[in-house]
């Protein structure tokens, strides 16, 4: 077992990265975290506010800054790489930052891991596998061929390929995880679940793309964090693990769940323009991770997870209200 004491978490001020930072502080008392984050529109220092200063240090910077990496990487045992441009709709409107951060940024981090002999864990997505048909009984496994659809997923697929090559060619001690759709607190209001919750809270009708039959495989962020820690400490070097919690649901069902939890009629939403190239279905078979590393999700009751997520957005209006109007205005211009 690998027991890192000093880790760098890139993107630690975003939705999932900040959950991982809080998870490590809570569960691994001997570990110090350096958060490296550029604080883009998606990164907020308040996402890691209140954590003890002797456990978490914040460095404001870009993963693409090789000189900065030369200054901060030495002395760390591991890099856990979450930083990315993460939203499909943004990647369709303007792919350039996705190539810069997801591809070139990952390249810079891999080079730093190679120079300083640091263990590297790469956080990726199930979207690299493309999509499945609604009536296909198959789920993604570690052997599924890559077939990304969007600018976002193609840049994540590219970054996974770089990791594999840097492991095989240069011996970088790397692992990769590909996780399904996350939900929970601190998720940006551009994403499906928080967008609809905050629409309802601001008197706007929820917006469903296309027919709403697209299926996503939902996992609570807490379970993603415990899985990444498991892979970082016990995963086989050079291995890939799929992370998922058997949470397949179509979008219209999720939306009706949100409306019901929030006491609204189940048909109080609008159908809007579909996402170009919209993936039909994602589904994860996470049996390798469960069988080989003994991981299991702890938050498998989607309805109760959704309820606490709704409560978090109700109780934390000051967190999302400042960015809500501009996010909706961007969608409105796209007919969504
Ligand atoms: P997010 O958009 O909420 O956060 C991204 C974070 O990265 C932000 O704090 C941002 O400031 C930072 N960042 C962006 N560009 C940077 C750069 N060049 N240098 C340094 N920091 C930078 O994203 P998220 O939803 O938390 O996703 C985190 C990771 O998990 C991503 O790699 C994403 O591909 C992956 N992932 C997400 C999901 C999901 O459902 N959201 C599922 C599977 C995998
Ligand atoms: O307003 C909306 N209406 C709607 O119907 C939005 C924002 C989305 N949708 C649909 C599109 C998708 O089928 O809901 C589904 C989920 O959409 P997103 O929240 O944008 O997530 P998705 O595109 O599935 O990608 C997410 O999961 C995989 C993350 O954003 C990625 O970072 C991750 O890799």
Image (tube, rainbow, N blue to C red):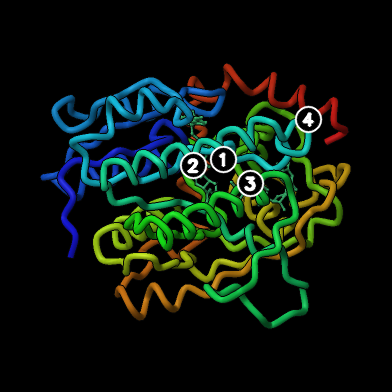
Residue at the spot of label 4: 331
Circles 1 and 2: CB atoms closer than 8 Å: yes
Residue ID at (60%, 20%) = 323
Residue ID at (37%, 42%) = 19
Q: Using the numbered discs, state the Cα–Cα distance from disc 4 to disc 2 in whole angstroms.
A: 29 Å
Q: In this view, does 96 lie above or below 181?
A: above
Circles 3 and 1: CB atoms closer than 8 Å: yes
Few, some or many residues within 10 Å of mark 4 (<14, 14–19, 20+): some
Residue ID at (48%, 60%) = 164
Q: Is mark 3 within 8 Å of ligand 1?
A: no
Q: Which of marks 4 and 3 is in front?
A: 3
The x, y position of residue 92, in whole percent, is: 77, 38
Q: Using the numbered discs, state the Cα–Cα distance from disc 3 to disc 2 in whole angstroms.
A: 10 Å
Residue at the spot of label 1: 102
Q: Does the residue labelled 4 lie within 8 Å of ligand 2?
A: yes
Pick the residue in front: 269 or 221. Answer: 221
Residue at the spot of label 3: 155
Q: Which of marks 4 and 2 is in front?
A: 2
Q: Does the residue labelled 1 lie within 8 Å of ligand 1?
A: yes
Residue at the spot of label 2: 106
Q: Earlier in the sequence, mark 4 or mark 2?
A: 2
Q: Which of marks 4 and 1 is in front?
A: 1
């Amino acid at each position: 077992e690998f027991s890192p004491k000093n880790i760098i978490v890139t993107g630690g001020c975003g939705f999932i990265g900040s959950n991982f930072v809080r998870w490590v502080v809570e569960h691994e008392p001997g570990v110090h975290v350096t958060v490296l984050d550029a604080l883009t529109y998606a990164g907020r220092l308040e996402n890691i506010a209140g954590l003890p200063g002797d456990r978490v240090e914040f460095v404001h910077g870009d993963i693409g800054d090789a000189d900065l990496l030369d200054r901060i990487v030495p002395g760390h045992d591991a890099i856990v790489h979450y930083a990315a441009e993460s939203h499909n709709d943004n990647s369709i409107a303007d792919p350039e930052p996705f190539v810069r951060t997801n591809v070139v940024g990952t390249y810079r981090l891999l080079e730093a891991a190679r120079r300083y002999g640091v263990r590297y864990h790469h956080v990726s997505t199930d979207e690299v596998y493309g999509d499945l048909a609604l009536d296909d009984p198959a789920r993604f496994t570690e052997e599924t061929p890559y077939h990304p659809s969007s600018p976002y997923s193609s840049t994540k697929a590219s970054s996974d390929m770089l990791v594999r090559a840097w492991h095989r060619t240069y011996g970088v001690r790397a692992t990769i995880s590909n996780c399904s759709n996350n939900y929970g607190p601190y998720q940006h209001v551009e994403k499906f679940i928080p967008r609809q919750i905050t629409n309802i809270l601001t008197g706007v009708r929820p917006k469903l793309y296309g027919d709403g039959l697209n299926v996503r495989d939902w996992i609570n962020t807490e379970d993603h964090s415990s899985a990444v820690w498991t892979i970082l400490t016990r995963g086989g070097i050079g291995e890939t693990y799929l992370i998922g919690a058997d949470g397949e649901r179509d979008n219209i069902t999720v939306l009706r769940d949100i409306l019901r939890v929030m006491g609204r009629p189940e048909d109080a939403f609008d159908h809007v323009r579909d996402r170009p190239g919209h993936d039909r279905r994602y589904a994860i078979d996470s049996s390798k991770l469960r069988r080989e590393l003994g991981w299991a999700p702890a938050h498998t009751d989607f309805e109760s997870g959704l309820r606490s997520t709704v409560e978090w957005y109700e109780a934390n209006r000051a967190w999302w209200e400042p960015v809500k109007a501009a996010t909706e205005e961007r969608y409105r211009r796209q007919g969504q």
